[in-house]
Amino acid sequence: MVQLQPVGPIGTFEAQPTRPGEALRVVLMTDATAHLEALVMCQLGLVCPLKVDDALYTRLEAGSAGHMDFTTQSGQPLSGYSYLYSGTQLGMVRDGDAQLQVLDRAKVAWCSVATQCDNQLLPTPVCPGQWTCVNNGCQFECAAGTFVAPP
């Protein structure tokens, strides 16, 4: 059986944002769900982190470039981004902005439940087992009970 690989970015991408509106973490999964963390302006002019789990995204692509729109599960728009994807980096420009932000593929994929690890197409070790989610990080547990880091 051939498994079709989605075109475009799938997985966990992270950055160190410097201004409101920039992403700390973007997690894109094969089931069109996403987890977003970004800096936003909050009360008294302070910059605060915002987390949105179980967001949805749609993607229009042309090779390694495209556009993504994020919404809540109820369909409320969150944000849109033009993007360039290189395999290890995701460059994003928020709609209405001109500033490019580059996010690097994370060394440890983010999760809140183990199925989110499966939905990021992570490389698996050569042992029978399953993905687990420990402290918001994907880990592969071989059937013998030892944790093995993906290659």
Image (cartoon, grey):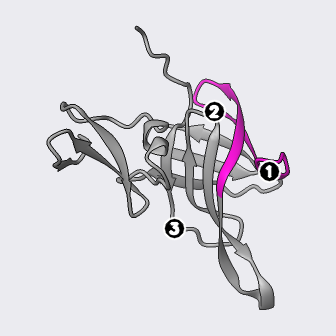
What is the quadrant of residue 60 in the picture? top right
Mark 2 and mark 1 residues within 8 Å of each other at the beta carbon: no
Residue span colored magenta = 53-77
CA distance separating discs 2 and 1: 15 Å
Residue type highlighted by circle 2: Ala
147 up-or-down from 67: above or below: below
Q: Is mark 3 on a helix, strand or loop?
A: loop
Q: Which residue matches tag 2? A: 65
Q: Is mark 2 on a helix, strand or loop?
A: strand
Q: Which residue is drawn at 64% across and 49% down?
A: 92
Q: Which residue matches tag 3? A: 16
Q: Residue at x 64, y 36 (%)?
A: 32
Mark 2 crowdedness (10 Å alpha carbons): few <14, some 14-19, many ≥20: some
CA distance separating discs 2 and 3: 22 Å
Q: Name, please, the residue furthest toward the top.
A: 1
Q: In which quarter of the image is the N terminus?
A: top left
